[in-house]
Amino acid sequence: MRHVEPLSVEAEYVLKFINQTQQHVFLTGKAGTGKTTLLHQITASTHKNFAVVAPTGIAALHAKGVTIHSFFQLPFGTFLPIHEWPPYSTDTKLETKITLAKHFKMNATKKAVIQQLQLLIIDEVSMLRPDLLDAIEFMLQSVRKNKKSFGGVQVLFIGDLLQLPPVIKDSEWQVLQKYYAGKYFFNAQSIHNKLIYIELEKIFRQKDAFFIDLLNRFRNNTIVQQDIDYLNKYVNHSFSIDKNAGYIILTTHNYKADKINQESLEIIKEKPQSYKAEIVGDFPDKIFPVDENIVLKKGAQVMFIKNDTNAEKRYYNGKIGVVAKLSQNEIFVYFEDDQTTIEVEKYEWQNIKYTLNPTTKEIEEETLGTFVQYPLKLAWAITVHKSQGLTFDKAALDVSQVFQPGQLYVAFSRLRSLEGLILLSNLQVQGFATDNDVISFSNQKIPPQSIESTLIQQTNTYILDFLLECFSWKELEQHYRNIRFASDEASVKLKQKIDEFVTNQENAIKETVLASENFQKQLKNLFFKNEKQEYINSRIEAAYLYFYPIFLKMYEEIVYQLVELQNTKKAKTWFTMFLELEYELSNRLSYLIRAKKMMHLLHTNQELNKKSLHAKELIAIKENANQKAKERYKDTHKTLVDFDEFPERYHKTKKPKEPKKSTLEETLELWKQKKSIVEIAQHRKYSVQTIYSHIAKLIAESKIAIQEVLPQDRIDELENLFTNYNGESLTELKEKASNDVTWDELKLYKATLTN
């Protein structure tokens, strides 16, 4: 089992900058410092509405996000950060602010996601061009109608600039150089002097201090002839991959890697076995994470491309093994280092899009399609580019034709130590180019002695802005005005009733406006004077006790009006407007609760995160308000009819958002709803075989009994069949079984033995 390392000091600071400031952050680090691990930690813990994007489809898939172009509806081409058309001709496809704005006509869902976005995470930022980043900012400012930096959205940039650079054609650069000093994201006009630069220092992949220093010299373009002479001791011109088990060749071009893998597979005199991916829904071939059709043989050298999601952590991204046994429905891989053999399980990749929950206004993921396949690749060779993020114990480097800055660093940094290194040719000093722009930008890294003071300053700014928003009723007032001036075909009597109600509510708000404005002034003054947190906390407590009862009463009145309108004919327009008002008022209550919690957490030196700031009280408030409204309606209208029997004319009540479930938990929930395996597969956009694998795991975890899935006569037949089973391959059992016994049934019964 692999040891899980605690977060480093730098990583802890990144989490704090994300959760308690609005500061844009550039998170970088050498290979093996845990950037991806921290990304997943951030998405799991942040209290902000976020989206993860990346420049390419594969990078987005690995980051569990979407591509930049699809999320922002940006066309492919060169963006110029100007309004007018440039006074020169070019063959390059150009976009200006005026032409780009035409692409911002989007559906209501996409627009709502953009408007509710609070944190944008851009992964693999080394590949991000400056013009594309400026296009992102222009889009956010336009759709959100907010001229702040990135439309008021905090941006987290993640990547290692000394690995793979952006791709800009010469013809494009001829135009772009008129507007940008360089080709990297930090050359964009949108982030000039607006970034906090934090680098993860601790390397988890390598432990050897000499090797780490050597990698740093590669990375910083300070390699010397003495280093080259030392590394050339690892040259082996007669190296043969078929005579060196466990090694993988890192080369610079796809055709080289493909040729080595294909030739090595053909040498093995065993029967080939094909495994076709299960693809359901929308999953474009350009983002396939592995081959759709994997062809393997017993004895083939393979590499895992994902970490083991099971508790045992038997393999990791880049671990190499040999196919020990295979059949139509099984693959067993042997690891020489620890002399173990494991059965490989299929992995599930999801193609997602972001949507907005209309009730909670939280950004959620919607699965468009799934790709299920064994997380394996032939591993006699791989390109340097595709090796990013992988870790190897043994590798033979073919880097004689390096064509991009950073490729040498990426290649060498895949290795855990020099003990596993072989060079296929002598290294030359030429070509060890690292972009000087990157070196210069790296000098902007925030010094350790400044990071704490910067965090405190940015936290104060963020907290003040948040508190001022908490105690501002402008949006709420606008909603009441919208209702007052709205017209509908409803009866005059209903319109008069609504006008009277809205007037009363507006008067209630007006009585609080002066107190609200005075309190905002007081807050600004307290923060300007750098007043003690304890005193600010006491003032927030007092404000909460004053404003909260007022808005709670208003909220309960709105909920009652919704009950009335829901049971009134020809009132859909009013119901919809009151529903928006209900959201705004519940949001106001949520803000007040969160303001109180936020100040308490800061005062007691506790973390701001999704769990600590969750306004769970709001669920009880809503349930109580609904119950009171139902009772009041029955009493007012003297009805004995149970409220649940009333028609829901305009609106289906949606449950509050629950924490995200694991894929097994989602399948289990649907199973408990008495859905069949076929129905679950259709609902979840997975193949039937994948759902069977979920059911098998749930049986192994004692969450489902096999008697719920299979008839007793089949269970009895399987029990006899499994007599003397040694716990490995099911192939021999399948051959002994009757023709109607399926692989899925065998795996279901095997799971009972694990149980």
Image (cartoon, rainbow, N blue to C red):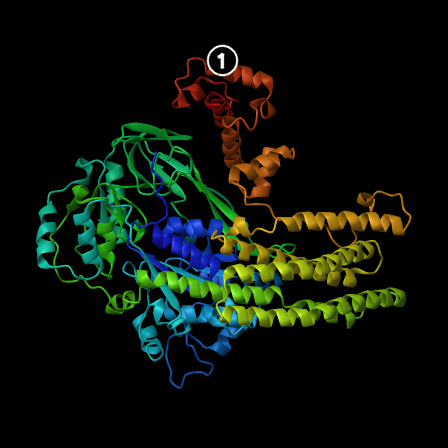
Q: Indicate whether 342 appears above or below 367.
A: above
Q: Residue at x 56, y 23 (%)?
A: 706
**Residue 127 can be seen, yes or no:** no
Q: Residue at x 40, y 30 (%)?
A: 330
Q: Which residue in the structure is indicated by mark 1? A: 720
> Relative to the observer, which residue lies in front, 584 or 379?
584
**Residue 644 can be seen, yes or no:** yes
Residue farthest right in this picture: 638
> As drawn, is 246 to the left or to the right of 282?
left
Residue 98 percent across, percent down from the top left: 50, 78
Q: Indicate whether 581 appears above or below 648.
A: below
Residue 607 percent across, percent down from the top left: 47, 52
> Relative to the observer, which residue lies in front, 493 or 75?
493
- SS type, badge 1: helix
> Relative to the observer, which residue lies in front, 109 or 204?
204
Residue 370 percent across, percent down from the top left: 49, 45
Residue 100 percent across, percent down from the top left: 49, 73
Label 1 is placed on what type of residue? Asn
> Relative to the observer, which residue lies in front, 185 or 30?
30
Q: Residue at x 20, y 44 (%)?
A: 417
Q: Indicate whether 167 appears above or below 311.
A: below
